[in-house]
Amino acid sequence: MRLLHAELLKLRTAPRTAIGLLLAMLGLAVLGSGSTASSADESPFAIEASVSDILDVASLAVIFSLILGILVVTWEYRHGTITSTFLATSRRERVIGTKLVIGVIAGALLAVLSVVASLSVASFWIEIELERGHWELIGRIVLGTAAWAVLGVGVGALLQSQVGAIVASLVWFLVAEPLLGLPLDEVADYLPGAALDRLMGVDTMEAEGAGAPSVEHAYGLGVAALLTGAYAAGFAVLGVVSAVRRDVP
């Protein structure tokens, strides 16, 4: 409990970074949802589809969650406070474990704020009626965003370099993975970014209504959740092992 309180205090004492990420995320969510809602047609089906599109805009919180997870670890390495943190707690795995808990909380909170902001802005143009499929999609967005915060903590603990971890993560998910998916089509759907997209994406006719086009997927939502959790847990374990075995700079 003492470690958790200390990590929350560290997060509160870096307000410019946290608030900057939050404002950037909310700004993109507001612009994206406003543009989507204002261009919606008047038909009921189009509005239902727009709600799903708006939730898809809200899912951009996952990128900010990943970055925040990285920062939770690497800003201590950057500012040299990691030495005193490890000295204050003899078991390093407990320190990284507490940061993982902070990542889960922060990631879930970012997802909720992004969804609320997106739907609130969209309500100025269209009537928001959330069906069961929409609520399930919101739950998957929160789950995926929290998982990617855990992954970010793991990557940060593994690489220890703030800039290196952020650049490596963004290059992988935005550039490398899509390029690898071209020659490795059979395994592309099982890469971490693809698994996350499947988890946080709109399921076939689930949130858009009976008239929505059919979408084929390589696996179901349950497998997507397991894959996403496995990738997050795998990097978390690697991060813990790296923190325990490496010398503190």
Image (cartoon, helix red, strand yellow):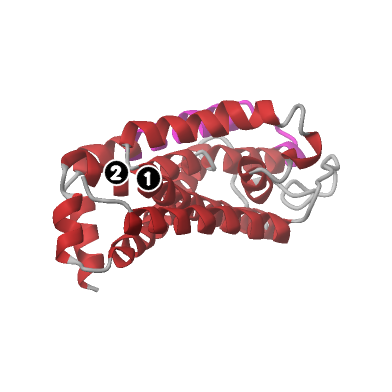
In the rendered image, residue 42 lying in the magenta stretch gets the answer yes
If the image is split into quadrants, where does the N terminus sit? bottom left
Crowd around label 1: few <14 · some 14–19 · many ≥20 (10 Å): many
User: Depth check: 127 or 247 in front?
Assistant: 247
Task: Give the magenta part as a residue range.
Answer: 22-46
Q: Residue lying farthest bottom?
A: 1
Q: Which residue occupies 51% across, 38% down?
A: 60
For badge 2, the amino acid type reads: Thr
Number of numbered discs: 2
| Left or right relative to 34: residue 84 | left
User: Depth check: 132 or 45 in front?
Assistant: 132
Q: Which label is found at residue 245?
A: none
Rendered location of residue 228, percent (x, y): 60, 53
Residue, disc 2? 74
Q: Is residue 169 above or below residue 80?
A: above
Secondary structure found at label 2: helix
Q: Which residue occupies 75% across, 27% down?
A: 182
| Left or right relative to 75: residue 194 | right
Q: In this view, does 149 lie above or below 31?
A: below
Residue, disc 1? 156
Residue 28 shows in the view:
no
Rendered location of residue 174, percent (x, y): 56, 29
| Left or right relative to 215: residue 239 | left
User: Depth check: 124 or 121 in front?
Assistant: 121
Crowd around label 2: few <14 · some 14–19 · many ≥20 (10 Å): many
Q: Which residue occupies 46% across, 32% down?
A: 168
In the rendered image, residue 195 lying in the magenta stretch gets the answer no
